[in-house]
């Protein structure tokens, strides 16, 4: 039974002017008449992750450009893919459950030729995984075709309204509702129709749209979900993210909130949600195409683990001079403004949250600041003091995470000075805050963050040290000690990575375990949490992290010989206390895997396996301790045959609640 749909919306198809099959009838399928299956989870609603959009208008082979762009966005997570192309035959659509490669095979059998194309990779939200629910979607008369990221929160209300007017629906999606509504609104003026559509739809979304009677233009709308426009020579592209356009151009513009665009082959115009013209300047992206290729590695994750020494160097470049931190080229802070700060809030999600927890431990060693680290999805619902004496720092790899954006807007409304630490200096959060520090990590394609975690810790440390220096809370001796050791960290990181085979051997001995416990104290506790997250993300093994001192408050009940315990315990002032937890673990027969500093002989005989890390200052242990945990997770997942770069149910950027 095929899972592919090919729909021809030209005037010759089915004898009508682009009329779609009626509900319950059979569409024209690629293999000649077998209806696509409906998967068992049809009708469910699940959390939406960032799907992929690519739209192209120009002189190239449209199918090739769109397929290539979708392939470069696969890291975002999806379960189906589709494409619409406009040409001499009108609008033709191919949709497929599965991978972009499956879609490409179908298009190889049923070539799509034209000058305008839309492509999409979908993660099921409204409606299950089926061809009917895959994008692109169109209205019942075939006058509008579109792809959509995000959620139309009032789609049921609109669907009921349209159904009463005689509109028939063929899918369970909110996206089809948008297409049907747009067709009802459309009176021949695309700009007017899109402005009205923007007013009618509630929620966060990004749209790329083709009107069947306007074969010379491609339209885009952005509300919440990110969308870029890329400028070429005789061609223009819209996409969810930069990697999709890198083979063709590095000149782009980010659509702002409430902005729309009209793309032709030779021009792009912009307007706001009220229809007023908007002038936008193109920016040049400094990413190279090699940055989004695997470069000979079997997986992006392994490549990105190996890039962490370089990320450390780039993150410190032009920020350290003569053994001191100097961010004055990027931040307009003065000693007086720094001293006025009474509260420091570090806000993030996922791996970024753990990086913030590490930084908290550094800053609190030297400062009397009231420091709070919070998960972005919780922060904006807290009743906490925030005002003009608050520096709120938002840590986000993409700069588009919806919870983090909402938290930033919440803090800004309360009067806080807002700062972004992000890998995308052109992102929404970067454009909204008062201060920005870029990670300089380059694109990260693997869903499980590795090199951006390293970049986040580095930039957070530099920011923290600079703030403390301006506040006169950090001695020159401590600053130069930490900076001197940070400058040699890249070499120690690379020496660790060179010993990956030792960690691979350890991973092979534990890959069949069903549960893991991760423990750490002080600076090592957030690293234990990050290690557990990496393992569960890509191997699907249940892994939990606890502060080692919490062992006797519950987790110890889990221990037996079937539950390995990973203990992060490099040399620091809490080593002996952590060693006592190791002994408690051994008494319950759980095998112990220790992350320990080279030369620490007291751990020998206490742990079944040891992953050694070079010696460094206590405050900098996290930069080294995380490396073996990343490599361990990678090789466990590899041994289990998991899809490492695109783990199930996950995507790189979460852009709705």
Image: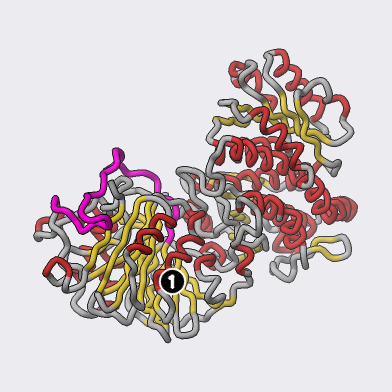
Q: Report the label total.
A: 1
- Within-10-Å neighbours for mark 1: few <14, some 14–19, many 20+: many
Between 532 and 330, the one nearer to me in the picture: 532
Determine which quarter of the picture holds residue 116: bottom left
Q: Position of residue 247 (x, y in %)?
A: 54, 72
Seen at 43% across and 71% down, the residue is 238
Can residue 326 be seen? yes
Residue sitting nearer the eye, 382 or 163: 163
| Image-quadrant location for residue 579 | top right
Residue 448: percent from the left, percent from the top? 58, 47
- Which residue appears at 34% of the width and 68% of the height? 111
105 part of magenta stretch: no
The scheme the figure's colours follow is secondary structure
Q: Is residue 179 above or below residue 458?
A: below
The answer to whether residue 467 is seen in the rendering is no
Query: Going by the picture, which residue comes out furthest to the top?
Result: 587
Residue drawn at the location 53% of the way across and 67% of the way down: 242
- Predominant secondary structure in magenta? loop
Where is 565 relative to 40, above or below? above
In percent of the image, x 71 and y 55: which residue is there? 307
Q: State the residue in front, 578 or 43.
A: 43
Q: Is residue 51 above or below residue 91?
A: above
Left or right, 526 with respect to 259, comes to right
Relative vertical location of residue 249 with respect to residue 327 in this rendering, above or below: below
Q: Is residue 35 magenta?
A: yes
Image coordinates of residue 568 in percent, x first then y, are: 73, 33
Q: Position of residue 616 (x, y in %)?
A: 85, 44
State the extent of the magenta-drawn residues as a range: 24-52
Q: Which residue is mark 1?
A: 238
Q: Secondary structure at mark 1?
A: strand
When asked about the image quadrant of residue 607, the answer is top right
């Amino acid at each position: 039974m095929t899972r592919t749909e090919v729909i021809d919306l030209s005037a010759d198809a089915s004898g009508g002017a682009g009329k779609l099959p009626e509900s319950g009838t059979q569409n024209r399928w690629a293999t000649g008449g077998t209806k696509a299956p409906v998967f068992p989870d049809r009708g469910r609603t699940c959390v939406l992750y960032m799907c992929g959009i690519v739209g192209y208008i120009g002189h190239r082979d449209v199918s090739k450009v769109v397929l290539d762009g979708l392939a470069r966005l696969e890291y975002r997570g999806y379960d189906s893919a589709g494409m619409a192309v406009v040409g001499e035959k009108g609008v033709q659509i191919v949709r497929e459950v599965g991978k972009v490669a499956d879609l490409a095979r179908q298009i190889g059998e049923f070539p799509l030729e034209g000058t305008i194309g839309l492509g999409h990779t979908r993660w099921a939200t409204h409606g299950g995984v089926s061809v009917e629910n895959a994008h692109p979607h169109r209205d019942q008369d075939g006058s509008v075709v579109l792809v959509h990221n995000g959620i139309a929160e009032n789609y049921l209300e609109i669907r009921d309204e349209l159904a009463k007017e005689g509109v028939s629906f063929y899918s369970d999606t909110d996206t089809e509702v948008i297409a049907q509504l747009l067709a009802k609104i459309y009176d021949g003026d695309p700009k007017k129709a899109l402005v009205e559509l923007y007013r009618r739809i509630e929620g966060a979304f990004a749209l790329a749209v083709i009107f069947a009677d306007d074969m010379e233009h491609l339209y885009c709308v952005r509300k919440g979900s990110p969308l870029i426009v890329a400028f070429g020579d005789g061609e223009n592209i819209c996409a969810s993210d930069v990697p999709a356009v890198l083979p063709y151009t590095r000149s782009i513009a980010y659509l702002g909130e409430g902005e729309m665009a009209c793309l032709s082959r030779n021009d792009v115009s912009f307007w706001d949600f009220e229809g007023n013209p908007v002038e936008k300047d193109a920016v040049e992206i400094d990413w190279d195409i090699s940055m989004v290729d695997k470069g000979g590695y079997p997986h992006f994750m392994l490549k990105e683990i190996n890039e962490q020494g370089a990320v450390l160097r780039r993150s410190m470049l032009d920020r350290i001079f003569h053994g001191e931190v100097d961010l004055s080229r990027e931040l307009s802070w003065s000693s007086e403004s720094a001293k006025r700060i009474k509260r420091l809030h570090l806000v993030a999600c996922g791996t970024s949250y753990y990086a913030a927890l590490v930084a908290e431990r550094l800053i609190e060693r030297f400062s009397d600041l009231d420091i709070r680290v919070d998960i972005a999805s919780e922060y904006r619902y807290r009743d906490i003091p925030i005002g003009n004496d608050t520096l709120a720092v938002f840590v986000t790899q993409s700069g588009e995470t919806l919870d983090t954006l909402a938290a930033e807007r919440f803090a800004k409304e309360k009067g806080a000075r807002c700062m972004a630490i992000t890998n995308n200096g052109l992102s929404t959060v970067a454009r909204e805050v008062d201060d920005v520090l870029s990670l300089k990590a380059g694109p990260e394609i693997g869903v499980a963050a590795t090199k951006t975690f390293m970049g986040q810790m580095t930039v957070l440390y530099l920011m923290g040290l600079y703030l403390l220096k301006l506040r006169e809370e950090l001695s020159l001796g401590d600053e130069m000690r930490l900076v001197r050791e940070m400058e040699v960290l890249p070499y120690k990181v690379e020496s660790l990575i060179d010993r990956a085979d030792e960690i691979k051997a350890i991973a092979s001995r534990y890959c069949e375990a069903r549960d893991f416990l991760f423990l750490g104290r002080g600076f090592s506790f957030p690293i234990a949490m990050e290690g557990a997250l990496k393992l569960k993300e890509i191997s699907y093994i249940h892994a939990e992290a606890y502060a080692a001192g919490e062992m006797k408050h519950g987790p110890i009940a889990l221990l037996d010989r079937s539950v390995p315990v990973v203990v992060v315990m490099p040399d620091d002032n809490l080593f002996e206390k952590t060693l006592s937890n190791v002994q408690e673990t051994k008494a319950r027969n759980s095998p112990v895997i220790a992350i320990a500093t080279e030369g620490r002989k007291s751990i020998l005989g206490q742990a079944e396996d040891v992953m050694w890390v070079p010696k460094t200052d206590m405050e900098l242990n996290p930069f080294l301790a995380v490396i073996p945990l990343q490599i361990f997770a990678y090789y466990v997942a590899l041994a289990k045959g998991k899809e490492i770069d695109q783990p199930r149910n996950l995507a790189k950027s979460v852009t709705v609640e």
